[in-house]
Amino acid sequence: MQCVDHCDDPDPKKRIYFEQPLWQTLNMFVGEFAVWIVYLYQLYEKRYQTTIAPPSS
């Protein structure tokens, strides 16, 4: 852990350490994975897109 506040205090109980919460890590993973899902879906749509001919006049 890394000290982020009151690091020079002689009393170790008053020091504040950074702890990466599990919930934040999980949310970041889900968010980054969702970006990949959207990207792969767009590739799929582009690859298998049906072309619609414009109406002839």
Image: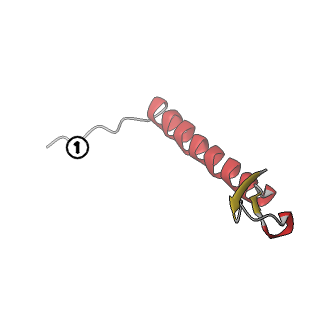
Residue 32 location, x and y as percent? 62, 46
Residue drawn at (55%, 45%) of the image: 38
Residue 12 location, x and y as percent? 84, 63
Residue drawn at (77%, 60%) of the image: 23
Q: Quadrant of the C terminus?
A: top left
Q: Which residue is mark 1?
A: 55
Q: Secondary structure at mark 1?
A: loop
The part of the image, by quadrant, that contains residue 24 is bottom right
Along the line of sight, which residue is nearer the eye, 24 or 40? Answer: 24
Along the line of sight, which residue is nearer the eye, 50 or 47? Answer: 47
Residue 25 location, x and y as percent? 73, 52
Q: Which amino acid lies under the numbered mark 1 shown in the image of this protein?
A: Pro
Residue drawn at (34%, 39%) of the image: 52
Q: Is residue 22 left or right of residue 47?
A: right
Residue farthest along the front direction in this orientation: 10
Residue drawn at (70%, 66%) of the image: 6
